[in-house]
Amino acid sequence: MNQPLYNVPEEYPARQHEEGFSLKKWFDRMLAHWQWFVLSLAICLGFCYLYLRYTNPVYNAVASIIVKDEKKGADLLDNSMMKEIGLSGNNKLVENEIEILKSYDLMQAVVNNLQLYTSIQHVGRIRDVEVFADDLPFHLDIVNPQDIQETQKWQVTDSTNGIVFRGDKNKAPVFIKYDQSYSYNGINFRVKQDSSYSGARFSEYNVAVSVPSDAAIAFGRKLSVDAASKVATVINLEMKDANKKRAVATLQSLINIYNIQGVEDKNRVTDNTVNFLNERLVDVTKELQGVEGSVEKFKSENRVTDLSSDAKQYLDLSQQVDIQKAQSQTQLNIIAALEKDLRENEANPKLVPSTLGINEPSLGLLIEKHNELVLQKERAQQVSGPKNPMLIDLQEQIKEIRARMINNVANLKQAYTISLNDISGKDAQLNGRIRNVPLLEKKLVQITRNQNVQEQLYAFLLQKREEAAITRASNIEDSRTILRARSLGKVSPKPTMVWAFGILLALLIPITVIGMRDFMNNRIGDVDELQSRMSLPLLGTIPHIKKLKTPVVIHGRSRSAAAEQIRNIRTAISYTGNGKKVQTILVTSFQPGEGKSFVSLNLGLAYSLLNKRTVILEFDLRKPMLTKSLGIPAKRGISSILVGKSGIEELLIEVPDHDGNLFVLPAGSLPPNPAELISGINMPGLINSLREQFDYIIIDSPPLNVVTDATLLQEYADITLVVLRQNYTSKLVYEKLNQRIAQHPDQRLYIVLNDTGKTKRYEDRYGYSGGYYHDKDHIVPKEEATLN
């Protein structure tokens, strides 16, 4: 028995031959399908071109504002504490303003201001382009936007003195002159001409009129508002839109309306103060008019023109005391009114008048802080629900401030009451002295004193009202624009990104397809794969042959790639004997259709060209193909010899044109028990007899994985060639053959890979073209060539 040729472990041997990923192999694999990459590149770049040509661009507009922080006093402690932990006390202020800028109500005001609920597109040959403002020769002024119930789409064509309007495709168009009003489906609008327009005329436009609330929501989604940093009060605004000018106009209008609404909130505080002062002035005016009438009536009736100097001196002092008493009483009344307001509106806090003339700085600071918190609460209620933590915090702060104000007012009320009592005591002393003055003169002085008091109070209220008016006029917005709205240009689609994505996709598609094909492919691949997963040595490869007229590819003058590979296999066989002659060669395969008979025939031809007597035994007793492909009729053959009915000499068939060096022993009739015949007593005699007559014996046997015949015939062979076919043989062959050699290492098995892909390097090196070199007389179908 032959010595073991392989040293393999008992476990699955292919694992020790597996190799890592090879970039060169992968690149060669991709390069073999270069047509796929060209096609994919053409399709993807074509789609990129169409996308860039027909997609409407999107433009980006930006702006920046800085929010003024007017918080003073108590907030300084909070700010310093937050800065110590790495935060800024301005965060809450900036977050509140960001929510206001993003609020629906503010965007609704912008939509109404710019009539953004009307969208107009210029109809072009390639795509429709969004137009806005001075890009139009006309303007549609919607009179009643609040009556728009659903989106309407119209068609408008620019004309000489107006527009051609079509609201329904099924109805005739209507010509509307400039400055003429028109009503359609409940929407009233006026057509206005833009005299500054200098673009193309007589163009067609598509008009879409949306519900204003829907337009506000749509534009709100296009708006982005963010803080520039955590420590600054700068807010960055960004708007993306299909029209560059509309994006800029929308952003700038948003900032303007935001500032206007901020000033209006401040004015509400001073307006409340002015209203309170006006109400007091009405009452004081009536009282003053009554007093002046009393003086005039008294002097007229009593003919009084002057007072005595003594009485006048006492009365002057008394008058000063009365003025002080009146001022204290006024302050006390104001404090009482303020206390009443604070207690009555405790559940629903309102703005408190700030400039009422109360000479108490601490109360003034509390009122200012209270009004600021009330405004913040009203803003927060516009953008959030009642359970918002920020809103709850504001309510708690307002409640605390109001409690402090009530306590402060109570203290002031007590102080002014004491002061008023003291003044009343002084007044009583002066009145006692005045009793000595004549009654008539005393009455006149009293009336005059009351007149002076009312005049002083009237002048005081006028002064405070003027101060409130000045405060209102000095109110400015809480923010300052540091970057006016401007366009940064087109943000999408970006041609560079689109082309890069197209190229990347064009590469990924065929790579993915090829990878999936390889992953799903259950057939053996190229030589590298076979050598990496197979324990058996590779003896040679036979390239793919397009067409052959005969299965014979090798003769004396043949220089085809297939013929040269057959010669290489013939040479390689001579080196497998370890110094001993290899005479009997068993040719089998893993499964039918892999070309074992084709290899057997041409290998026999190759030996005959060396003037070696060679015989090919057609031992495929189940499905013989060799003699059939050669067109040799053979009713008797090996089966007859094995049953003892015929001799070898009478059944040997000489292949013509080979100088008596090539013979074929056909299979003959198909027996019902081929395995038993091969194991019979006549088999050794057959092989021994042929060994004496021939230099080389080539046994064409059935596939290994189908029947046991090949295994039985291995006993008589020096080596066994297992023919596999690229992209045809199942990958199950790796496991089966590796297990086979692991269990029987003494079997001399070698692999021949048939029908491999054309090798460009081989063709370039040896001058082959399409796998042939002056060998055009052997063209037959591939199926016949491989003896499928």
Image (cartoon, rainbow, N blue to C red):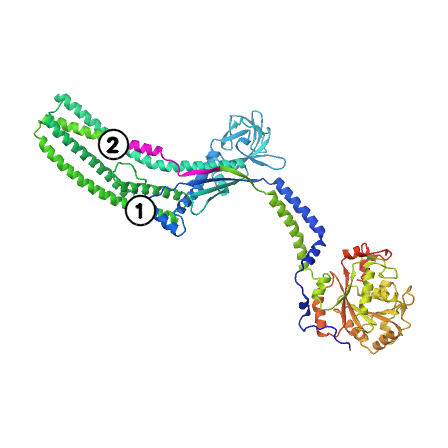
In the depicted view, which residue is nearer to us: 197 or 104?
197
**Visible in this render: residue 704?**
yes
Residue at the limit of the structure toward the left, as seen here: 436
Report which quarter residue 22 is drawn in: bottom right
Count of numbered circles on the image: 2
State the extent of the magenta-drawn residues as a range: 461-484
**Residue 460, numbered label:** 2
Residue position marked by numbered label 1 in the rendering: 399
Where is the C terminus found, in terms of image quarters? Answer: bottom right
**Visible in this render: residue 620?**
no
Q: Earlier in the sequence, mark 2 or mark 1?
A: 1
Q: Where is residue 440 shown, x and y percent of the image?
A: 10, 25
Q: Where is residue 604 shown, x and y percent of the image?
A: 85, 66
Based on the picture, tell me whether residue 595 belongs to the magenta stretch: no
Query: Is disc 1 placed on a helix, strand or loop?
Result: helix
367 displayed left or right of 309? right
Report which quarter residue 290 is drawn in: top left
Marks 2 and 1, Cα distance to the nearest angstrom?
32 Å
Residue 531 in the image: above or below residue 167 = below
* Residue drawn at the location 52% of the way across and 27% of the way down: 192
Give the mark toward the camera: 2 or 1.
2
In the depicted view, which residue is nearer to us: 480 or 300?
480
Residue 451 in the image: above or below residue 698 = above
Q: Where is residue 655 shown, x and y percent of the image?
A: 89, 65
In the depicted view, which residue is nearer to us: 702 or 236?
236
